[in-house]
Amino acid sequence: MSKNLPYATSASIPSFRLHSSSFNDGATLPPAQTSARFGVAGGKDESPQLSWGPVPEGTKSLAVTVFDPDAPGGGFWHWAAAGIPAGTGSLAAGAGSPDGGMLPAGAFQLKNDAGFSGYLGAAPPRGHGPHRYVVAVHALDVADLGLGAGAPSSKLGPKLDQHTLGRAVITGRFER
């Protein structure tokens, strides 16, 4: 397992393309992806638009995660969705709304570290410096990870370690 991420990273895990029309890889997150709930001016707590592919052969489902490895205490889960059908190639901006209504049939959200299912925008502590928001799409070799809707996102990392065929990653940055 990576020191900074809650799941293993390895050069032997194939990568695939991941793009967001919401922000560019390595760029500062726009207000839409920051947190109104945690007092960021202009924040909207809107999950980013994502498009990816092609996924590795044998992919049976996908998971999407957003993790801040720079948060105090060893990191913070901002979003996790699993059970995404393998043929899915994108998610619209806002798919991580707490009602999950924009996710594909069969997909579900886990609880983020703020305690609710859905996307929580960036909101690092003031003066803590820049934080990275690692957005990852995980291609999985199983259709069911054995976790249900509302399970804590922290339970997802070990499952990803066991079942990831490929992973695509982009990173946004934010500080206040």
Image (cartoon, rainbow, N blue to C red):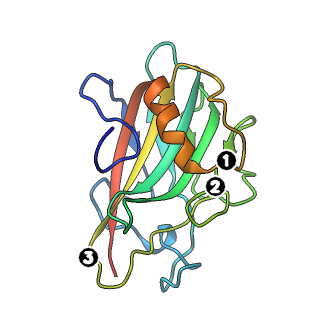
Residue flagged by tag 3: what amino acid is it? Gly
Q: Position of residue 95 (x, y in %)?
A: 63, 53
* Relative depth, front residue between 39 and 112: 112
**Residue found farthest to the front:** 73
Mark 3 closeness class: few <14, some 14–19, many ≥20 residues within 10 Å = few
Q: Where is residue 167 in the image (x, y as percent from the top left)?
A: 39, 32
User: Mark 2–mark 3 contact, CB under 8 Å?
Assistant: no
Residue flagged by tag 1: what amino acid is it? Ala
Badge number at residue 129: 3
Q: Is mark 1 on a helix, strand or loop?
A: loop
Where 82 sits versus 165, above or below?
A: below
Q: Where is residue 35 in the image (x, y as percent from the top left)?
A: 52, 74
Mark found first going from the N terminus, 1 or 3: 3
Mark found first going from the N terminus, 2 or 3: 2
Q: What element carries label 2?
A: loop
Badge number at residue 111: 2
Q: What element carries label 3?
A: loop
Q: Does residue 36 appear to the left or right of 1 in the view shown?
A: right
Work out which quarter of the rendered image holds the N terminus and state it. Answer: top left
Location of residue 99 (image quadrant):
bottom right
Residue flagged by tag 2: what amino acid is it? Lys
Gap in angstroms between the C-alphas marked 2 and 3: 26 Å
Q: Where is residue 105 in the image (x, y as percent from the top left)?
A: 75, 36
User: Mark 2–mark 1 contact, CB under 8 Å?
Assistant: yes
* Relative depth, front residue between 84 and 114: 114
User: Which residue shows up at 24% across the image and 27% down it?
Assistant: 11
* Relative depth, front residue between 89 and 81: 81
